Amino acid sequence: MLRILLSLILILMPALALSNLDKPLKANAKIAFLGMTFIDTSTEGAYNGERPDQTARTRLLEETTRKRFAKMGFIVLDNGPIAEELANTVNPADCYGCELRMAERLDADYVLVGEVQKVSNLILSMNLVLRDVKTGEALRALAVDIRSNTDVSWLRGLDYILKNHFFKS
């Protein structure tokens, strides 16, 4: 009996953990979007450095994200008051809570951060995380792998995250 109970607990734990990432979001909530960070771990990046087309794609994702959240009724805040700290932060998605502190200074309800990691010119990974500023709780988070290093593939990955997880309801 104990073995069956433990098995059920282990089977249901992932579902219970993921159910937390599907709570309704506040209407007209204020979002501090701290941008998308591009991380190049490819051999190409190690030898050739930053590519202008990938920098442009990162900006394209940021603009598309801002527009999509505004279209869905959220207020995307101006990062002007935290611009200097944000510029000095290598990766707001991985800064030990600095994203929450910056968003709190903007009086945001939520903070949104994202990353695109290039493994090779064919394989990239994209993730987006939305946290409640007061509690630090992740309300939405999803990572997808994308194939091909083009505007279309990057936008398709972002659209998948937003359509199938962030705004699915």
Image: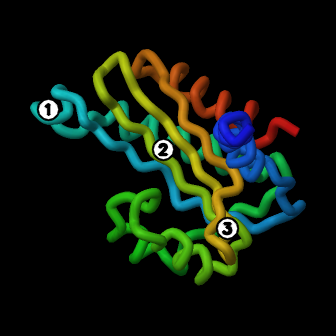
Task: Give the mark, 3 or 1, whose residue is nearer the N terminus.
Answer: 1
Q: Do the residues labelled 2 and 1 touch (CB within 8 Å)?
A: no
Residue at image x 82%, y 53%?
Answer: 23
Residue at image x 69%, y 67%?
Answer: 132
User: Is 29 placed left or right of 94 in the picture?
Assistant: right
Q: Where is residue 85 in the image (x, y as percent from the top left)?
A: 40, 76
Using a 10 Å C-alpha cutoff, classify the residue at mark 3 as few (fewer than 14 neighbours), some (14 to 19) or many (20 or more).
some
Amino acid bearing label 3: Leu
User: Is 30 placed left or right of 138 in the picture?
Assistant: right
Q: Name the residue under label 1.
A: 48
Amino acid bearing label 1: Asn
Q: Name the residue under label 2.
A: 59
- Mark 2 falls on what kind of element? helix
Q: Quadrant of the C terminus?
A: top right
Q: Quadrant of the N terminus?
A: top right
User: Is 155 placed left or right of 53 in the picture?
Assistant: right
